[in-house]
Image: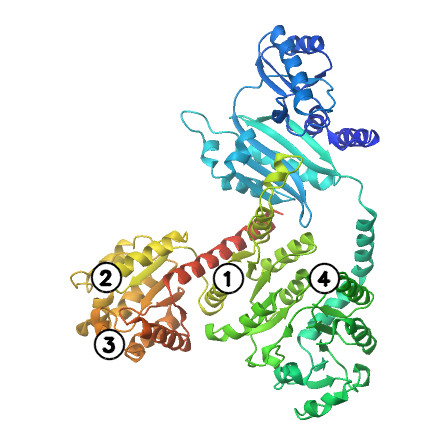
Amino acid sequence: MKEHNSIAQVIEGAKAQGRQVLSEIETKRILEALGIPTALAEAAESAEQAVRLAERVGFPVALKVISPEVSHKTEVDGVALGLNSGGAVRAAFERIRDSLARKLSGARFEGVAVQAMAPPGVELLAGITRDAQFGPLVVVGLGGVLVEVLGDTAVRLAPVDAAEARAMLGELRGAALLEGSRGRQPVDRRALALLLVKLSELALRYPELKELDLNPVAAYPQGLRVLDARALLEAAPEAAAHAGDAARAASAERRGRRLENLARALRPAGVAVIGDRGTRQYMWLRALDRFTGARYSVQPDARERAGIEALGIKNFASIGEIPGPVDYALAAVPRQAAPQVLRECVAKGVAGIAFFTAGFSETGEELGARLEAELRAIALGSEIALVGPNCMGLCNPSLGLLNWPRLKPGAAGDVSFISQSGTHAIGFCMHAPWHGIKANTVASIGNATVLEVADYLDVMADDPATRVIGLYVEGVGDGRRFFASLKRAARRIPVLVWKGGATDSGARATFSHTASLATSGAVWRAAMRQSGAVEVTSLEALLDAVELLTRARPLAGRRIGLLGMTGGQSVVLCDTFARNGLEVPELSASSHAELARFFTTIGGSYRNPLDAAWTVLDPAGRNNLDRMLDILDGDPALDALVMEVRPGMGLAAIDPAATEQEMVPVLDKLARFNERARKPLAVVVQGGHVPGDEAARLVAGLQAMARGRGLVAFDGFERAAAAFRTVVERQEAGARLGEADSAA
């Protein structure tokens, strides 16, 4: 098309001259070709030429320095605004020239850009940049040249559609300024959203456009205008990068088969442990003592043979000697031996192998990096699924495929977990049963040398048994592929992501304001939001949310009905849920009238939250709890119910002999209600007035009793509120993905 011919001419012209930096005038030509309005500027090489141009466009005018060495004009005093005469233009020209020479010695002065002053509007920054992992990004912020001071920005991965662009604008802390204030009219949000969509398209179509900085953009009640603009082209790719691309391309054709082998390794019929030793107490072989398939040991050291065979496992000197097929191997060998072990597994036709072996690239040593590169080359030249190295490998409790001796087999589950930390993978497997969570498949992936997070996501999301996927991620290699896999998985099931090292490391010193504002943390958060995944901040938070997702009824919204056991607890319960972005609405008039019939205890409240202890414990009203719960379950103002539970509900807990057993009737009532309820129910277990040394035991006992009755149970208000917030965010993310799919 004509507009793209114009853009290509600008870019190719700069390349032909060996330039990476496009001037303001060149950049605005690109924007105008896309239909983005700009304050057009013309170049003046002399003061007299600047005056003539000013007279032609009409006073007042602005002058801005033109120099290929200048990224930010204001830093060299290279901008003069509101010039109303020829004399003012001459003086400004000389002042800008002299300031450049003084502040940036050696910089080339190529004149000034002359443009008419634009009418004032709400100032923003907009632009594109590229992240090393996630590729092209679109950035918008309020404040124009002050945006870095205000720190009010939103970032998204390209492509950005109109709905996502509107969401970016709404995300800004100063979004109210766009709606009009102090008598000003609202700005044209549609024009701003269209600007972001066009920038997204530009970033995707022209990968050589590394950064584009529009700053400021003036937004008006009708339309907008880009007042200043600058662009940076990508330098020629290095040969090493090309080599990496070629290696990935050569591996792509094998990836499908490799993922099939990963799926086979996650559900193996035959497993081999390579290199286990008595000095480790044969921990890998012992971890598999309840594996349902065939177990083999590979250990050429004859001194280990007796100890291995005492476990009832046949030992072989090499994996090639094993008579049957091997779907999965776990290697715990010295790092120098790892490449040869991998070659032998490839020759044997092993579907997947995990290396517990460490000492590779994570050490920063040359030898470790070289050995890992050798492992990578061998794996990429085959179809084997290489897990790790430096990992705890794969786990499938329903098959007895365990990666730690203290783990226990379990029934077939519906939750899968991927972790770049072996500790967190084992922690998930150990703590999930306490939450009533049944693990399906778990992968500790370590250095992720060949199989990345995206590969495990694809395999686990395709497993029809998986209802939820959890991730612990510290970093990803191919960010775009990770994003695509995450989005694909989140379209089908909830995906909860716990990011290690998620804090911003600070803005980088870069060419444009746009790039400096796209910090690693902001980019990660954008990827999570756009993909439909939901972030959590700890293993506990992940387990809490998974418990609510898998063990309670689906949550329809963020309106929560709360039942506390005293007035003070009710207030804290309400505040905690509200701080987490959840709503604690007034009950409907009909519910209020129903509760008033029996909620007669002085000091009790039957608003939301309910101060319910004395009403529940009233001997004359043994069915009060049932009536209360049924009323709330039928209230159209509520989406879910949360009830505080504690020994000796009310002041009766002053009795030091209070135990969890006195709560059996209450828990039984809650369990029966939970079976007939239409809305999700959770209980928050508290120690109440029980002394601290007894509280932990009582809380743990009550949680176990509640979960044993099919109830979702939390041990604190904050954990309960955070779990509900996470599930609501998942619900809203799923709705956004559905709307985007419908629009497409």
Of circles 3 and 4, the one toward us is 4
Inter-mark Cα distance, 4 to 2: 65 Å
Query: Residue 114 falls in which quadrant of the image?
Result: top right
Badge 3: residue crowd in 10 Å (few <14, some 14–19, many ≥20): few
Q: Which three-letter amino acid code belongs to the residue tagged 1?
A: Ser
Identify the residue at horizontal 63%, vertical 82% (top origin): 283
Numbered disc in front, either 4 or 1: 4
Residue occupied by mark 4: 361
Q: In the image, is 445 to the left or to the right of 344?
A: left
State whether residue 14 is above or below residue 57. below
**Which numbered disc flags the more N-terminal residue, 1 or 2?**
1
State the CA–CA distance, disc 4 to disc 1.
26 Å
Q: Nearer the viewer, mark 4 or mark 2?
A: 4
The amino acid beneath tag 2 is: Leu
Residue 655: x, y in percent?
A: 22, 75
Q: Name the residue under label 2.
A: 595
Q: Specify few, some or many for label 2: CA neighbours under 10 Å numbering under 14, 14-19, or 20 or more.
A: some
Q: Dot 3 corresponds to which residue?
A: 656
Image vertical order of residue 705 relative to residue 447, above or below? below
User: Which amino acid is tagged 3?
Assistant: Pro
Secondary structure beneath dot 4 equals helix
